[in-house]
Image: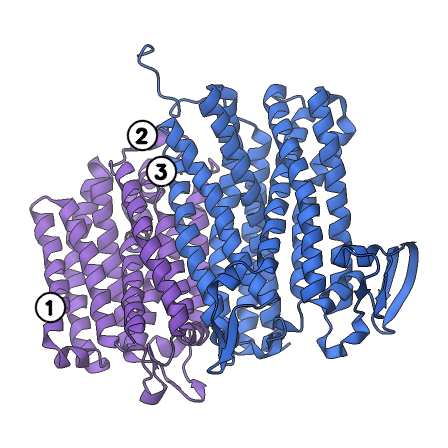
Amino acid sequence: MDVLTLSRLQFAVTSAFHFIFVPLTLGLSILTAYMETRYVRTGDETYLKMAKFWGKLFLINFALGVVTGITLEFQFGMNWAEYSKYVGDIFGAPLAIEATVAFFLESVFIGVWIFGWNRVSKKLHAVSIWLVAIASNLSALWILLANGWMQHPVGYVLRNGRAEMVDFMAMVTNPYGLLKFGHQLVSGYTVGAFFVMGVSAWHLLRKNRPDFFKRSFSIAAKFGLASTLLVAIIGDFHAVEVAKTQPAKFAAMESIWETKRGVGLNLLLVPDPIKECNSLEKLCIPNAVSMLAFHNPDAEIKGLKEFPPELRPPVQPVFWSFRLMVGLGTFFILASILAVIISWRGTIEANPLFLKILVWSIPLPYLANQLGWIVAEVGRQPWIVYGVLKTSDAVSKSITTGQVIGSLAGFTLLYSFLGFVDIFLLTRYARKGPDDDLSGIIKPTRQEV
Amino acid sequence: MALQITWFVLWGVLWGVYFMLDGFVLGTGMLHGILGKSDGEKRVMINTIGPVWDGNEVWLITAGGATFAAFPTTYALMFSYLYTALLLLLFALIVRGVSFEFRGKLDNATWKKGWDLAIQVSSLIPALLFGVAFGNIFQGLPMDAAGYHGSLLSLLNPYGLLTGVLFVLLFLEHGALYLTVKSTGDLSNRAKKLADKLWPALLVVAATFLVSTWFATQLYDNYLGETLLLIVPLLAVASLVAIRVFSAYGSPLKAFAASSATILLVVATGVIGLFPNLIPSSIDPASSLTIFNSSSSPYTLKIMTVVAFIFVPIVISYKIWVYRIFRAPLTVEEVIADKGAY
C-alpha cells in the first residue's frame, strides 16, 4: 500500500475511534447536567445520586474522547501537509477557534465539576457541568463548520496557489455545515439517551434500585424521543442540501444510475457498480426519492452515469451505510415512542422483553453515528474538498510508507488496548450501580453541626 | 506585516504559556514514583494536578491550531517533517491523560503499578521530545526546495539532546516546586529538598545551553543587532537564580513563580532569536519558513486577531479563577476522604 492509502486508512481508524466517545459526551453531558439541576432545584438526593452515577460513566468516556482528539488536529499536518498548505488559510481558522472558544471552557470546567463538589456552591457546581455541555456542543459546531466547508466550500477564492478566505461569515453560516451540526448534535443526544435507557434497563431487569433507574429511564426516554425525531427531521433537510450541492454523493446514497424525473424509492435494492445498474429493485414507492431530495415529486435526480467514473464515490459503502443508518434511525424513533409510553404509564418493568432489547441496543446508535460519517466522508470522494482538491493531491510529500505503516500499527495497538480498558471500566461501573454514600459531597447543614 | 508580527508574538506566547503550565504537570508526572512513597502520596500528587492538567494541555492544542490558522505552511511542513517525533509525543500524551483518569478506578495493586509506570514514562517523553524539537528548530532543519533531508535520528544531535535535557530539568524543577506548594508535610518537604538538589544541575545545563547556542545556532544575531533585547536572556538567568534564593528563604510560592518566569523567558529567548523565522533551514536560507512566506492572508489574520483578543483574556480570567478555587494544598487524608478524586 502507498502513503496515500495508508494515510487514509489511518485517518479513518483514528477518527472513527475518536468518534466512539464524542457522541456519548454530547448526550450524556446534557442528561447529567439536567439531573444535577433537578437536584439543585428540588433538593431531592436521588437526583444528586443520578448526577454522580451517570457523571462517573460520562467521565470514563470523556477521558478517551479528549486524548484521542489531539491526534486528529496533529494529523492534518502530519499526513495531509499538502491539504493543510492549500486550505489552511480558511480551514485552520475554525480549528483554532474551536480550541480557544470551546476546548478551554470544556477542560477547565470539567476540572471544577470533578474536584469541586465541596469547594464551590451547589449552584456553581451545576453551572460547571452545563458549561461543559455547552462547550462540547460549541466544539461540535466549529469542527462541523470546518467539515461543512470541506463538503461544500464557500467564502474563499483561489489565489497565491491556495484557497484563501474572503468571507468568514459565509463559512460560519454555511447551510451545509449548520445542518450537519444539527444532525450530529441530536445523533449524539440519541447515543446518550439509549445509553441511559440501556443501562437502566439492565438494572431494572435485575430489580436493582427500581426508583433510581425508573427515573433515569423516563428522563432518557423523553430526551431520546425528542432527539430521534429531530435526527430524522434535520436529516431530511440535510439530504436536500446534499442533493443540491453534492449530486454524485446523493446518487450513490440512493444508488441511482440514470438521470430521471420523479424517481421512486426501491425498498429492496442491490447495487451492481460493475454493470453500472442495480441487480435488484423491488417494492418501489413512486416519486419518493425526488420528494426526499428536492421536496418535489417531479424533481430530476442526477444519476451516477452523469459523472465520469473517476469522479464518482464508491457506491457500495455509501449506499449500504446510508440504508442501514436510516433503518436504525427508524428503529430508534419506534423504540423511543414505546419507551415514553411505558414510562408514562408506569409499566416499565412489565416489559422485560423490550428492556432486554434496549440493553442490546446500546451499541446501535454508536453504529448509526459511524455509518453517517461513512456516508459523509466516503461519499465525498475522490475529493477532500468537494470540487476543489482531490484527496490524492492532499497527502504529505515528505513521509514514507514505512513511517505510516509504523504509525498506523501503533495507533491500532494503542487504541485497541485503550478501547478494551475503557469498555471494561464502563461496564464495571455501569453494573455497580449508584453509590448511596454522599459524604464528602453534601456538607452538613448548620443545625446538624 | 503588523498582523504577521502580532501572530508571531502570539505564537511565542502560546508556546511559552503551554510549557509554563504543562511544565509542572509533566514535572509532577516524572516525579510520580520518585517522590510518592505511598499510594496516598501518589494520589495527592495526581490530585494536585487533577483539576488543571486538561485545561493546561489545551494550550498545546491552541498553539497547534494557531500555527495552522496563522502560518499554515509552517504547520504543514513542521508536522510532516517531524512525523515520527510527533507520533511518539502523541502516544505519550494520550497515555498520560488516561493514566490520571484510570489509575484510581480499580483497587488493585498491579493495575495501579502499571499506570504509575505509564504516568512517569508518558511525562518524560513529551518533556524530552519538546526540548529536542525546539532545539532543532533553533538550529534549523535540513530542508530545501526539494523537501526535508532529516530523520528521527538526525534530530537526536548533541544540541537537540542538550535542549531536551534542559526541558526535562526545567520541568522537573518546576514540578518539584509545584508539589512543595501544593502538598503538605513530609511530601512537601521532600519535594523542596529535591528541587534544591536539582537546581545546580539545572544551572549547569542552562549555562551550557546558552553557550552552545552561540556555536550551534544563529539565535544571537538578533540580539547583536538590538542589544536592548539581551534583557530577556538576562532576566531568564536572573529568575533561574531567584528560584534558589526564594527557596532558601522559605518562600516556595515565590520560587514556583520564579520557575514559571524562567520557562517563559527561556522560550522568549529562543523565539526572539528566531524572528522573523518560524523554522530556519540549516542548509538553504532561502528555504527558511518565515512569518512572511508562510502566513495566512491578511484577512484571515485579521479575523483570528479579533477572536484571540476577545477570547484569550476571557480564558485567562476563568483559568485564574479556577486556580484560586483549587489553591489550597492537599493532604493525604483529604484525598482519601474525597471519593470524586483521582
Residue A295, quarter of the rendered image: bottom right
- Report the mark closest to the observer, 3 or 2: 2
Q: Residue at x 93, y 56 (%)?
A: A282
Q: Which color was chain A given?
A: blue
User: On the rendered structure, is B79 left or right of B335?
Assistant: right
Residue B299, quarter of the rendered image: bottom left
Amino acid type, residue under disc 2 in the picture: Glu
- Nearer to us in this view, A77 or B314: B314
- Nearer to us in this view, B119 or A93: A93
- Report the mark closest to the observer, 3 or 1: 1
- Report the mark closest to the observer, 1 or 2: 1
Q: Dot 2 corresponds to which residue?
A: B334
User: On the rendered structure, is A203 left or right of B13?
Assistant: right
Precedes in sequence: disc 3 or disc 2: 3
Give the class, few, some or many, for how many residues have Cα within 10 Å of label 3's Cα (few <14, many ≥20): some
Of helix, strand and loop, which one carries label 2?
helix
Q: Which chain is purple?
A: B
| A128 up-or-down from A118: above or below | below
- How far across and down, in percent of the image, does residue B175 sit? 26, 51
Measure the C-alpha gap from mark 3 to mark 2: 13 Å
Give the class, few, some or many, for how many residues have Cα within 10 Å of label 1's Cα (few <14, many ≥20): some
| A203 up-or-down from B323: above or below | above
Measure the C-alpha gap from mark 1 to mark 2: 44 Å
Callout count: 3
Residue A4, quarter of the rendered image: bottom right
Residue A324 marker: none
Of helix, strand and loop, which one carries label 3?
helix
Numbered disc 1: what chain?
A: B
